[in-house]
Amino acid sequence: MARNDVRPIIKLRSTAGTGTTYVTRKNRRNTPDRLVLRKYDPKIRRHVEFREER
């Protein structure tokens, strides 16, 4: 149970509106805010921001 509390699985959804998602884990103690990463969106073939979805 402790593993899921500290490092939950999160979905990162594309801000381009294509519906593309990445799945990853994050450490809640180090990053309590919503995660924003710049990753590749294959539907529009470019890098865009992906924001954490809860």
Image (tube, rainbow, N blue to C red):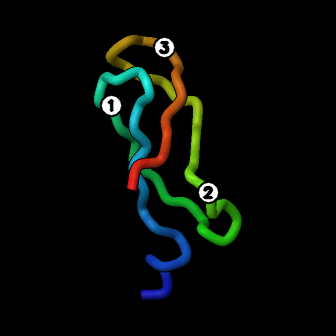
Does label 1 or label 2 sit earlier along the sequence?
A: 1
Residue 33 point in image, percent of width and height: 61, 57
Q: Which residue is mark 3?
A: 46
- The disc label shown at residue 20, or none: 1
Tell me how far mark 1 sits from mark 3, CA to CA.
12 Å
Q: Residue at x 58, y 41 (%)?
A: 36
Q: Residue at x 31, y 23 (%)?
A: 18
Q: Residues within 10 Å of mark 3 (few under 14, many from 20)?
A: few
Identity of the residue furthest to the left in this view: 19
Is the residue 29 above or below the residue 49 in the image?
below
Give, as a three-letter code, the residue at label 2: Asp
Q: Is residue 39 left or right of residue 20?
A: right
Give, as a three-letter code, the residue at label 3: Arg
Which quadrant of the figure contains the C terminus? bottom left
Please state which of residues 3 and 33 is positioned toward the viewer in this rendering.
33
Q: What secondary structure is found at the residue carrying circle 1?
A: loop
Does label 1 or label 3 sit earlier along the sequence?
A: 1
Tell me how far mark 1 sits from mark 2, CA to CA.
21 Å
Q: Is residue 46 left or right of residue 31?
A: left
Please state which of residues 18 and 41 is positioned toward the viewer in this rendering.
18
Q: Residues within 10 Å of mark 2 (few under 14, many from 20)?
A: few
Residue 9 point in image, percent of width and height: 42, 62
Q: What secondary structure is found at the residue carrying circle 3?
A: strand
Q: Residues within 10 Å of mark 1 (few under 14, many from 20)?
A: some
Does label 3 or label 2 sit earlier along the sequence?
A: 2
Is the residue 14 above or below the residue 24 in the image?
above
- The disc label shown at residue 53, or none: none
Q: Which residue is mark 2?
A: 33
